[in-house]
Image (cartoon, rainbow, N blue to C red):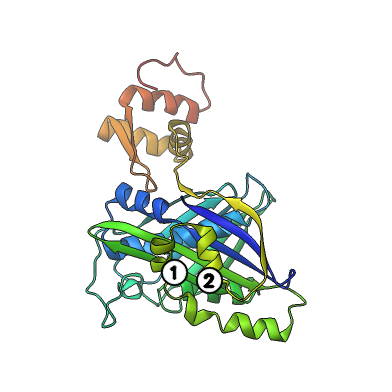
Amino acid sequence: MDKILHITLEDGQARAMVAVTTDLVEAARATHGLTPTASAALGRTLTISAIQGAMLKNASDSVTVTIRGGGPIGPVVCVARADGKVKGYVGDPNVDLPLKPNGKLDVGGAVGSTGHVTVVKDLGLRDPYVGQTRVVSGEIAEDMAFYLTVSEQTPSLVSLGVLCEGGHVLGAGGILIQPLPGCSEAVLQRLEALAPHLAGVSTMARELGDAETLAARALSGFSYAVLQETAPAFQCDCCRERIERALLSMGEAELRDMIAEQHGAQVSCHFCNKTYEFTEQQLLWLLYEAKGEASPARGGNQ
């Protein structure tokens, strides 16, 4: 079962987030029809987004991670909330590159390394927090570690992985470790030494199966306590009412063009591929609303 563990290390000197996200990433793969390379790119980003979302304080808070590296996969976009719900998509789900010489999926080649990582946190304040750093490698984990260290000034060790075989996701997970103020030099050195041992997180997620066992393996030698658990899931929160608001935001002129030229509209959600259909009459009702006039009683499909 997918789970994110919130962990305190060495009596509060550091914190860790340990996640198994195999079902979440497989749901994303199936929803978007992703190739193995695209599954790994989106799956890694979904995992770190879900981890960051689980670190938010309020249920209404959200974090949006966008990675534009200039590669053939296009943008990688994920949105996560504090309850573990996360959604995401890539620009081209069909991108699949040859394996790298070490036999690993070439996520960096698909994502590219010439663009930026942008993180937007909506914390219910007047303006959202926006941070941005350059893409380091396109491999996601390095890019997010660099972002957290530079933009949020929180030194971070990030390990992310997705294991694909036979067209399915068999293992996915992630680990985020951050020293906290007052962390001793001895503990800091031990944390830095962990990096090489966390590289196979997707294989560990497959073999060990649950976050508790993964944490025990990854944090062996450290004293730690689990403070909280979050159940992550791939879930889109789109609805017809939101799509209507989006159409209204386009304005009267755009709605008139859609009515005159298309006699209706089909609007698809990037995050879940669900399509919402609007007849010409339904667009006319929205046009009345856009003009601020009372519209005739609605009927038909809602």
Disc assigned to residue 218: 2
Residue 239 figure quarter: top left
Residue 85 x, y percent position in the rendering = 51, 47
* Mark 1 crowd level (few <14, some 14–19, many ≥20, 10 Å Cα): many
Disc assigned to residue 201: 1
Residue 88 x, y percent position in the rendering = 42, 53
Q: Residue at x 63, y 72 (%)?
A: 178
Asked if the residue under mark 1 is in contact with the one under mark 2, i.e. CB atoms within 8 Å, the reply is yes
Residue 58 x, y percent position in the rendering = 67, 47
Q: Residue at x 22, y 59 (%)?
A: 166
Instruction: Name the mark nearer the viewer: 2 or 1.
Output: 2
Estimate the spatial distance between the alpha carbons at disc 2 and disc 1, rounded to whole Å: 9 Å
- Report the amino acid beneath label 1: Val
Q: Is residue 4 left or right of residue 8?
A: left
Relative to residue 152, is residue 126 depicted above or below?
Answer: above
- Report the amino acid beneath label 2: Ala
Residue 211 x, y percent position in the rendering = 51, 59
Relative to residue 75, is residue 89 depicted above or below?
Answer: above
Between 59 and 210, the one lying in front of the other is 210
Residue 12 figure quarter: bottom right
